[in-house]
Amino acid sequence: MTQLEFQQIAKDIPLHPGIYKYFDAKGTIIYVGKAKSLRKRVSSYFNKTGQSYKTHELVQHIHHIEFTIVDTEQDAFLLENALIKQYLPKYNIMLKDDKTYPYLVIKKEPFPRVYLTRKKLKDGSEYIGPFTSVAKVREILDFIRLYIPLRTCKLPLTQNNIQKGKFKVCLEYHLGNCKGPCEGLQQEDDYADGIRQIREIVKGNLSPVLNHLKEEMNRYVANLEFEKAAQIKSKIEGLETYQAKSVIVSKHLGNLDVFSIVKEHEIAFVNYLIVENGTIIMTNTVELETKIEEEEEDVLIFAIAQLREKFNSPSKEIIVPYAIDYPEENLTISVPKAGDKKKLLELSQKNVNYFREELKKKKILQLEGKTDIEKEKVLEQVQKDLKLPQLPVHIECFDNSNFQGSYPVAAMVCFKNGIPSKKDYRHFNIKTVVGIDDFASMYECVYRRYKRLKDEGQSFPQLVIIDGGKGQLGYAVRAITDLGLLGKMTLVGLAKREEELFYPGDSESLKLSWDSESLKLIRHIRDQVHRFGVTFHRQKRSKGTFKNELEGISGIGKLTADQLLKRFRSVANIKTLTERELTSEIGQSKATIVWRHFHSDEL
């Protein structure tokens, strides 16, 4: 839609609050927005000078516009959010959060079970959450089960079944983890009281639970049941310790939602702290992408709406870094200058900054999502630090892997333009090496890799990293020399522990700064080849496709080999044993065979 075309319809746009929808030529909604005055807001898209490229692109794709007038700004706000969720317009802010969050479910059934789930079903059960961490949910569950006896069985505990005596108590009852509702030893009202306590614990409100336990302890004391009273006292002390470990800002603060934001160009990060009864019970940081020019305040408002709905916030007060026009009734918006609320805001800002920096490090490390210029800049730094004759747009890295001195394999990963080229990753079953010899194994896999590339006329990498240091590097260079490829690529060895780089023939190593971009990339490549090699190794072991060196000894079968490995853990350890030590494990005749195999040069 051109500015001239817009001017023809501008006078028909109402001045009332409402939402506007932009459609493209195919009739697809490409943007939804809200406004106090529809005419003023929509006109700004066509009259604004100095628009960003993406906003200009949006305007070019507008074919027609539709409006919905509402009574209040809050109605416009709610309708806008509903339409964005329904249509996912191309140019609206996108919350980059595809996680499936866990819930605590209180199952709708007699004597309800309480457990973790990721699926929220419409089955009448009560779902508490979602939570940002599975580990946190499991911690809460373990804590609940420690202090509140609950059933974990799936028995249909209807009153009819219980009265007929269909079930018997299990081990959980005898351990004190369940009060035996299956035999009618616990009534539903008592069980329901435990469920009410669970709701309070999840909210971080332990006072009702503590009060209940103290009343129960006093009853036992009054009845002279001191052993049971001591058990309850132990639970009370545990609860108080748990409460002390929680991040309590102030018990007088009540329920709050705290938000902070950092925006950089088209990307924004928003942190959300959930405070209940003065205790921080959850924190979550999300990334948002703005598709057109959006004010930071608008991004923050969008994130607040999305996050409060996702996490079912009951709070009637939100804390933000600056005043915002958030259209929700009965909601207090605070911009604290001092005190506990200010401390909460600072904590939220610390979290969002940490998240941003960690994400930056990760992206720099992997170079994924970077522009070609940014990738090239890091590769140029690698070229400079390693003194390479060419830009290392193609890097390969080799690593040997064996299990407790047995089952040798090798792996190679390939990076092109600084990011993994997984179709070029390779596994190697060592074929020509007898026993465990990391040097010979490295020779074999390097030789096989570059012989294939040479025979097929493919290009060679500019940089080859040999994980393992000088020994493996020397054998890799020998393989390259035997293939007549010396000088076609640069080989370096990477010491496993010190992360030092070695060049062939050099006595001194190259030590890069631990936080340099070059070492970050090399470290990431090294970690990839470790992961790739270990995964392959586990797969091979689980399929039983390995034959260890012991099984290759004439006169020694699999059972004997397994017996020795189980007892002494590795072939390397077995090599150090005396004949007498072997005899005590597998008998004289077999011990002699094994000992002579490993010590033939001593005979």
Image (cartoon, rainbow, N blue to C red):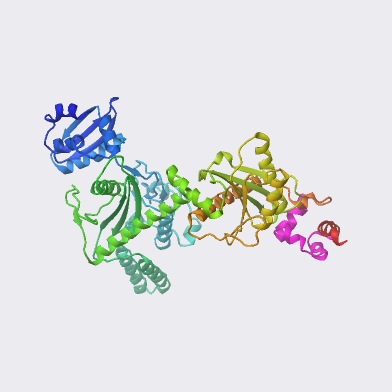
Q: Any magenta on residue 366?
A: no
Residue 74, percent across and down?
A: 17, 44
Left or right, residue 440 beside residue 115 = right
Left or right, residue 509 beside residue 196 = right
Residues in magenta? Answer: 558-587
Q: Is residue 437 visible?
A: yes
Numbered disc total: 0
Residue toward you, 445 or 536: 445
Residue at the spot 66% in from the left edge and 44% down from the top edge: 428
Residue 341, percent across and down?
A: 24, 63
Q: Tell which residue pokes out farthest to the top in this image.
A: 26
Q: Quadrant of the N terminus?
A: top left
Residue at the spot 35% in from the left edge and 65% down from the top edge: 246
Residue toward you, 15 or 264: 264
Residue at the spot 40% in from the left edge and 59% down from the top edge: 144
Q: Is residue 299 above or below residue 351?
A: above
Residue 354, percent across and down?
A: 37, 57
Determine the image quadrant of residue 233: bottom left
Q: Is residue 463 above or below residue 218?
A: above
Please name the predominant secondary structure of the magenta segment in the image.
Answer: helix
Residue toward you, 289 or 531: 289
Q: Tell which residue pokes out farthest to the front in this image.
A: 389
Q: Tell which residue pokes out farthest to the right in this image.
A: 603
Left or right, residue 343 beside residue 511 = left
Residue 444, percent across and down?
A: 71, 46
Q: Is residue 179 visible?
A: no
Q: Quadrant of the C terminus?
A: bottom right
Q: Any magenta on residue 575?
A: yes
Residue at the spot 24% in from the left edge and 48% down from the top edge: 301
Q: Is residue 473 above or below residue 370?
A: below
Left or right, residue 10 beside residue 147 = left
